[in-house]
C-alpha cells in the first residue's frame, strides 16, 4: 500500500482543510494510506505581526512548497487565495476540489447588520481589500488591523477589543462555527479575494502517481471560476495584499466574472462584469482586467498601495 503524506500549516483551519482532502482521498478507495504532516509557515511563527509588514507573496505557502520540493511530503494543501500567481515550474496544482462559500462574513457580539452598526464602530480585518470595501459602504467606521487564527480573532471580538470582525465565511463553516456568522456579505457589498473559499492540492509535477490519486478531487466548475479570478488578478499585476476583488460563477457552461479595484479609503472603485466561456476562463479574466485598466484601474491601484 502506498503512503501519501499531505503537508499542511498547523493552524486549526489549515488542519481541518487538510483532513477534508485526506478524507476525500481515502473515500476514493485507491488503496492508499494518507498521513498528515504539519509545517509552520512564516505567518504562523509571527501570529500577531501585521501582514502588511511581511513583504512578499507566499508567506503562507513557501515552507510547504519547500517541503514538497525536498520530497518530505507528497501533497500540499493550501487555501487557494494564498497561492502566489506563479507556481514553481517543478510543482503543479493537481486538483481544485469543490469550492466552499466564497463570501465574507460579518461577525458581531450582538446580532445586527453592517448597515445598523453604530457610527465609529471598531471593525477588525487584516485585509486591505475588506477595509476598502467596508469604507466604501460605511466611511464612518473605524477599521482596525487584526491578526491571529480564527479562534484568536473571535476571542478578541468577544473580549470587546472590536465591535465586529470580517473574516472569510468558509473558514467558520469548515471549523463548525457557522453559527457565529452574523451576516454573509452580499457580493454587491463586498467582493471576495480571488480564489476565496477554494482549496489547492499541489504536487510535484513529475509525480505521476500522486497526480493519478488526487485528480479524483478535481471540480471542473471550481477550477474554471478560480482560474478566471486569478487571470483577472494577474492582468492587473496584483497579489493578495492589494485591494483587488473578484468572483466568478458558472451556469450552463457560461462563466460570469465580476471584478473590482477599490481605493484604500473606499471613496472610489472601478467595477465591471464580463461573461464568457467556461472553457476559456483565463481569457475572460484577462479581458475583464483590460476593461478595468481602460477605466483607470492601474492608477487607482498605485494610489491605494503607495
Image (spheres, helix red, strand yellow):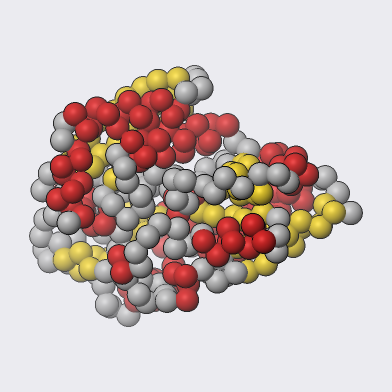
Seen at 20% across and 64% down, the residue is: 143
Residue 298, x across and y down, in percent: 20, 40
Q: Residue furthest right?
A: 1
Task: Give the camera-side residue of 97 and 235.
Answer: 235
Q: Residue furthest bottom?
A: 159
Seen at 66% across and 44% down, the residue is: 205
In the visual, does 51 lie left or right of 141?
A: right
Residue 21, x across and y down, in percent: 65, 52
Seen at 31% across and 29% down, the residue is: 288
Quarter of the figure with the N terminus: bottom right
In the visual, does 227 lie left or right of 131?
A: right
Task: Give the camera-side residue of 58 and 132.
Answer: 58
Residue 173, x across and y down, in percent: 50, 56
In the visual, does 277 lie left or right of 286?
A: right
Residue 120, x across and y down, in percent: 12, 66
- Is residue 131 visible in the rendered image? The answer is yes
Quarter of the figure with the C terminus: bottom left
In the visual, does 109 lie left or right of 71?
A: left
Task: Give the camera-side residue of 302 and 104.
Answer: 302
Residue 17's quadrant in the figure? Answer: bottom right
Task: Give the camera-side residue of 263 and 179.
Answer: 263
For the image shown, how many numbered marks are present on the structure?
A: 0
- Is residue 172 visible in the rendered image? The answer is no
Seen at 26% across and 57% down, the residue is: 128
Amino acid at each position: 500500500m502506498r503512503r501519501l503524506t499531505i503537508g499542511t500549516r498547523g493552524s486549526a483551519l489549515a488542519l481541518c482543510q487538510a483532513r477534508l482532502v485526506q478524507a476525500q482521498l481515502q473515500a476514493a478507495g485507491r488503496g492508499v494510506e494518507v498521513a498528515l504532516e504539519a509545517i509552520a509557515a512564516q505567518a504562523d511563527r509571527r501570529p500577531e505581526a501585521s501582514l502588511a509588514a511581511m513583504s512578499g507573496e507566499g508567506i503562507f505557502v513557501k515552507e510547504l512548497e519547500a517541503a514538497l520540493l525536498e520530497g518530505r511530503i507528497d501533497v500540499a494543501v493550501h487555501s487557494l487565495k494564498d497561492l502566489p500567481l506563479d507556481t514553481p515550474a517543478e510543482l503543479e496544482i493537481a486538483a481544485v476540489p469543490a469550492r466552499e462559500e466564497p463570501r465574507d462574513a460579518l461577525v458581531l457580539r450582538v446580532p445586527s447588520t453592517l448597515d445598523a452598526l453604530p457610527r465609529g464602530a471598531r471593525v477588525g480585518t487584516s485585509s486591505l481589500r475588506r477595509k476598502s470595501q467596508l469604507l466604501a459602504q460605511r466611511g464612518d467606521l473605524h477599521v482596525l488591523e487584526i491578526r491571529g487564527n480564527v479562534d484568536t480573532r473571535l476571542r478578541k471580538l468577544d473580549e470587546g477589543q472590536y465591535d465586529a470582525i470580517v473574516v472569510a465565511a468558509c473558514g467558520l463553516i469548515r471549523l463548525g462555527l457557522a453559527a457565529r456568522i452574523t451576516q454573509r456579505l452580499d457580493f454587491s457589498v463586498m467582493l471576495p479575494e480571488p480564489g476565496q473559499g477554494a482549496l489547492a492540492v499541489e504536487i510535484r509535477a513529475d509525480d505521476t502517481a500522486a497526480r493519478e490519486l488526487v485528480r479524483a478531487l478535481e471540480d471542473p466548475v471550481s477550477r474554471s471560476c478560480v482560474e478566471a479570478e486569478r487571470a483577472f488578478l494577474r492582468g492587473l499585476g496584483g497579489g493578495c495584499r492589494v485591494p483587488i476583488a473578484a468572483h466568478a460563477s458558472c451556469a450552463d457552461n457560461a462563466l460570469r466574472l465580476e471584478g473590482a479595484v477599490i481605493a484604500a479609503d473606499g471613496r472610489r472603485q472601478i467595477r465591471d462584469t464580463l461573461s464568457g466561456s467556461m472553457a476559456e476562463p483565463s481569457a475572460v479574466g484577462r479581458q475583464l482586467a483590460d476593461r478595468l485598466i481602460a477605466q483607470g484601474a492601474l492608477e487607482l491601484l498605485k494610489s491605494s498601495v503607495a
